[in-house]
Amino acid sequence: MRVGIFDSGMGGLSVLHQARRELPEAEFIYYADEEHVPYGEKTGEQIRGYIDEIIRFMLDKQVDAIVIACNTATSVATKEYRSRFPVPIIGMEPAVKQAVEVYGHLPGRILVAATPVTIAGDKLHHLLEQVDREDRVDLVALPGLVRFAERGDFHTEAITEYLRNELKDYSPENYKAFVLGCTHFNYFKAYYKRIFSDKVQLVDGNAGTIRQLMRKLGIKKGTDAVEKGSRGRIQYYFSGRPVTKEEEKRIGTYIEQLDIVE
Ligand code: DGL
């Protein structure tokens, strides 16, 4: 079993992290589009161009399925668009439905954070029409977190300052749940706990995305998923080229951070 996972950059490593936990036998190809990150500040047309190229790349590598480990890319790549390709393509959207279903009965509001493209996109607004009939969900764009994450900047006072400033109109104490609607935001889980009340529930879509991948591939948890590819192997690419040794070390620092926060 060979699975392709891609993101604009390093955020999707959090999805790969979850996938390896559930599918330790599978082989993975991880593609970070480091030449074009951040997607969250590009146009839909530009992003669809990048996605087309990455999907072609993955198909050349004979993957069995592709995970778009990026809410922004998913928000501009509709279902119809994804069904043009010959393997299952699993997208991600901010886990608002899960937040409403699990925490809806508790007092307080839900804050969804994502990139500017995801926040402005029709996809999220259609989802809210279905799951937020009582108007308990607020939205905020936090593109600065993508930049901190891409710099590998996980421990600086500037992150707290940025978050306090961007969230100043939202009265953090009013929120019971914070939805991480961008995979890059996973690196900063400790900061949200500090800024909101420590009772705030953090909700991300990674586990749901991997469950959906397994459903599409007809794999049950614990079964041997290897038919093709090398067991547990991961190949990393930056915008279509294999990463250098130095870049592989850089990826290692992100995995270490994920081991700390997850
Ligand atoms: N990681 C991406 C997401 O989940 C987008 C980050 C970016 O490139 O702006 O939305």
Image: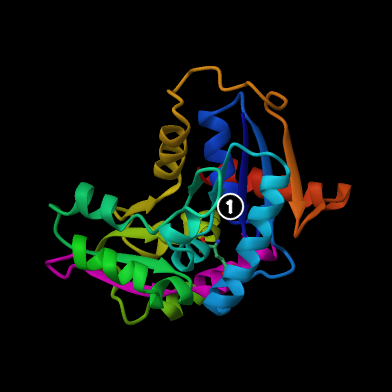
* SS type, badge 1: loop
Does the magenta portion include 212? no
At 68% across and 27% down in the image, what residue appears? Answer: 232
Whether 90 is drawn above or below 196: the answer is above
Q: Quadrant of ligand 1?
A: bottom right
Image spot of residue 255 (x, y percent): 65, 44
Say which of 231 and 165 sits in front: 231
53 shown above or below 205? below
Give the labeled residue for mark 1: 12
Residue 77 located left or right of residue 136:
right
Q: Residue 151 occupies which quadrant of the picture? A: bottom right
Q: Residue at x 47, y 18 (%)?
A: 222
Is residue 262 shown left or right of residue 167? right
**At which x and y percent is residue 77?**
48, 64
Q: Give the number of callouts.
A: 1
The colouring scheme, among rainbow, by chain, secondary structure or one colour, is: rainbow
Q: Is mark 1 within 8 Å of ligand 1?
A: yes
Residue 157 visible here: no
Q: Locate residue 60 relative to residue 87 in the image: left or right.
A: right
Dot 1, how many residues are within 10 Å of its Cα: few (below 14), some (14-19), or many (20+)? Answer: many
Magenta part of the chain = 132-161
Q: Is residue 142 above or below residue 71?
A: below
Residue 249 lies, in percent from the top left, at 80, 47
Amino acid type, mark 1: Gly
Viewer-proximal residue, 29 or 162?
A: 29
Magenta stretch: residue 148 in it? yes
Q: Residue at x 47, y 68 (%)?
A: 76
